[in-house]
Image: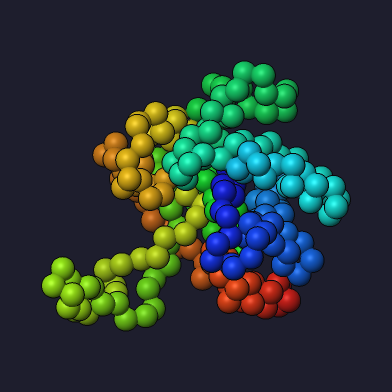
């Protein structure tokens, strides 16, 4: 499930960030291709705001993008967007080449940011393989900068960066668990899929991510993204 509900406000333009062209192709297409390259049999769901669907379909025609995927409507929050995507996996009227509701619950479900096109094939493999054994898996990378904690007294203290990790996506879960987690009411502390699952008391397993797997949210990120593509 590729969640692409961003409005691109930090990019400073009118085009939502997932549709911005990077080296001649919208970012979202690069992201979808990364998963398709890993496994051509993956069932891909794109979650988009309803009013962006026609624009995305026009982009697909313009770029001759024919990679199979289904589209779910985005919600007011990431939680609601993922919930809508999960509902689509259980839709009984799904085409014959899509998993049945029972198969969807028995499958692994990965949730990925639409503007993270540089997830490596090795990270995808680590996440999916680990999720076969563990119920919930997320990729992380070490913190390399010094961290300071701002206290309530508006003071700051250095904290040990070895005790922290930066979280990436895809976050991969056993289907039955993810459906159960998202049957809960929304809470503000649900900042990602792992936090929703953890609220059930289920531990999350960490695997190594890749540093290039950045989230493209600012113009500076686009500069880095273009450089990465030119050196692939």
Q: Position of residue 182 (x, y in %)?
A: 41, 33
Q: Residue furthest top?
A: 92
- Which residue sits at x=47%, y=59%? 168
Vertical position of residue 98 compared to residue 149: above or below? above
Q: Quadrant of the C terminus?
A: bottom right
Comparing 54 with 91, the one in front is 54
The answer to whether residue 224 is visible is yes
- The image shows residue 167 at horizontal and vertical percentages of 42, 60
Q: Nearer the viewer, residue 190 or 122?
A: 190
* Residue under the point 46% across and 44% down: 77
**Which residue is rendered at x = 60% and y = 36% of the image?**
73
Q: Is residue 224 left or right of residue 162?
A: right
Q: Quadrant of residue 21?
A: bottom right
Quarter of the view holding residue 88: top right
Quadrant placement of the N terminus: top right
Please name whichever residue, 87 or 144, is drawn nearer the observer in this view of the structure: 87
Q: Is residue 162 above or below residue 185?
A: below
161 with respect to 116 (left or right): left
Asked if one can make out residue 125 in the rendered structure from this viewpoint, the answer is no
Residue 27, given in percent of the width and then of the height, sits at 68, 60
Q: Position of residue 189 (x, y in %)?
A: 31, 47
Q: Quadrant of residue 188?
A: top left
């Amino acid at each position: 499930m590729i969640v692409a509900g961003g409005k691109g406000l930090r990019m400073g333009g009118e085009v939502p960030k997932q549709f911005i062209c990077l080296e001649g192709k919208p970012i979202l297409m690069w992201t979808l291709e990364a998963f398709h390259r890993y496994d051509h049999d993956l069932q891909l769901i794109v979650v988009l705001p309803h009013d962006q669907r026609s624009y995305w379909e026009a982009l697909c025609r313009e770029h001759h993008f024919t990679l199979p995927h289904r589209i779910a409507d985005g919600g007011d929050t990431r939680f609601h967007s993922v919930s809508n995507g999960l509902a689509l996996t259980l839709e009984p009227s799904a085409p014959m080449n899509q998993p049945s509701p029972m198969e969807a619950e028995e499958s692994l479900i990965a949730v990925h940011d639409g503007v993270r096109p540089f997830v490596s094939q090795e990270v995808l493999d680590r996440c999916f393989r680990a999720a076969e054994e563990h119920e919930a898996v997320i990729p992380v990378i070490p913190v390399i900068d010094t961290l300071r904690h701002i206290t309530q007294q508006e003071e700051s203290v250095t904290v040990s960066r070895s005790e922290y990790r930066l979280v990436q996506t895809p976050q991969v879960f056993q289907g039955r668990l993810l459906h159960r987690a998202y049957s809960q009411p929304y809470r503000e502390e649900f900042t990602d899929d792992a936090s929703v699952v953890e609220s059930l008391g289920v531990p999350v397993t960490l695997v190594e991510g890749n540093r290039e797997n950045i989230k493209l949210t600012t113009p500076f990120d686009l500069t880095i993204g273009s450089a990465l593509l030119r050196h692939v």
